[in-house]
Image (tube, coloured by chain):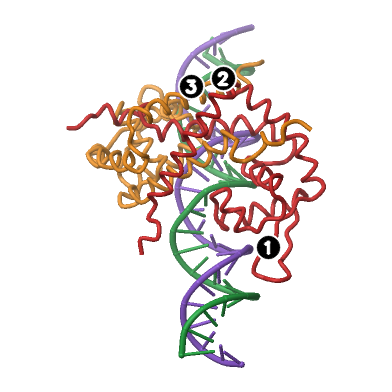
Chain colours: A red, B orange, C green, D purple
Amino acid sequence: MADDANLALDRQLCFAIYSAAHAFNRTYKPLLDPYGLTYPQYLVLLSLWQDDGKTVKALGEALHLDSGTLSPLLKRLEASGYIARTRDRVDERQVLITLTPKGRKMKDEAHGILMQIGRAAGCAADDLHQLGASLQALADRLRGQQTPDTV
Amino acid sequence: MADDANLALDRQLCFAIYSAAHAFNRTYKPLLDPYGLTYPQYLVLLSLWQDDGKTVKALGEALHLDSGTLSPLLKRLEASGYIARTRDRVDERQVLITLTPKGRKMKDEAHGILMQIGRAAGCAADDLHQLGASLQALADRLRGQQTPDTV
DNA sequence: CAAAATTATATTGCGCGCAATCTAATTCGG
DNA sequence: CCGAATTAGATTGCGCGCAATATAATTTTG
């Protein structure tokens, strides 16, 4: 009855985002494969390069992921030698995630990877930043709607 | 050595997209749960509402997914009664995906879901379309770089 | 027309992502 | 100070996504 055209796949912003996310993933994969890293693992490293020594919880807040995702991912990152996991001596519930030398060294490679992504993405750096800002604002609005503490 | 600031998480367009995609997923989930649908399953229905009776391959091209993802997903959609899978009589390799009455009826609900998403996303419909168009162009550029037939 | 190549779909294995549940440590209330 | 609530993280189960492989049907080639 209402505008069926609005239901068209290529009109859906959510599909554009869904699809762009997969496209990025596929673009990153061959760049990260040589290092034995996945894209989410690479995001963890990005976050640690900014601020080494986060708890799992802090990482989860930065990446919007929970422990169900992070715990096994971090174990794999530890197994491949990029990070170390140590229980906090003061509060034994917390696990501190820190970069190993290998993890810190990986940062040198990241600039090259970023450049290749920039090239694949079309590289008009300012436009891309603008797009990123719009998306971040959008994601924040979406998260804001999510049954906050409606208790 | 180079601009470390460019490696900051919140400067990464790819992270904005990654994160927005998850935010959309989480927004859709409570809207689709009552129907026993997941978000990728809902995308399949969107595509079929536009054009019923696609092959698996055609669906894969519309959604940028391969049979490894679609085959089990379509089996689940069949199990929950939204679609039917029938071998093409002429070319027995192909499987035709068609909507069941339940699948067609679901379209009526979709308008309401779309409105709720629109509201959560902030609803400036034109801006959102603009954003969607930019993203689609970006995803196409990314896909264009992906080792085409460099053979 | 038979063998080889191609095509469409299915299966397996692995790594997310998330809900639900569990455990252990800390904090709060009385 | 003790039991109850809270908190941090881990585990389980399920559904994607995707690479790699398998299978069966069709097309191409000699």
| Relative side of C23 to B133, left or right | right
Dividing the picture into quarters, in which one does residue A142 lie? top left
Circle 1 crowding by C-alpha within 10 Å: few under 14, some 14–19, many from 20: some
Which residue carries the number 1 mark? Answer: A95
| Relative side of B74 to B83, left or right | right
- Report the number of discs: 3
Q: What residue type is labelled 2?
A: Gly
Which chain contains the residue that carries disc 2? B
Circle 2 crowding by C-alpha within 10 Å: few under 14, some 14–19, many from 20: some
Q: Which amino acid does label 3 sit on?
A: Ala
| Relative side of B65 to B89, left or right | right
Indicate which disc residue A17 carries: none
Residue at left offset 40%, top offset 56%: A148
Label 1: state its secondary structure: strand
Which residue carries the number 2 mark? Answer: B144
Measured Cα–Cα span from mark 2 to mark 1: 42 Å
In the rendering, at what x and y percent does residue A124 appear? 58, 20
Q: Which of A119 and A50 is in front in this view?
A: A50
Label 2: state its secondary structure: helix
As drawn, A129 above or below C19: above
Measured Cα–Cα span from mark 3 to mark 1: 41 Å
Q: What residue type is labelled 1?
A: Val
Which residue carries the number 3 mark? Answer: B137
Marks 3/2 same chain: yes
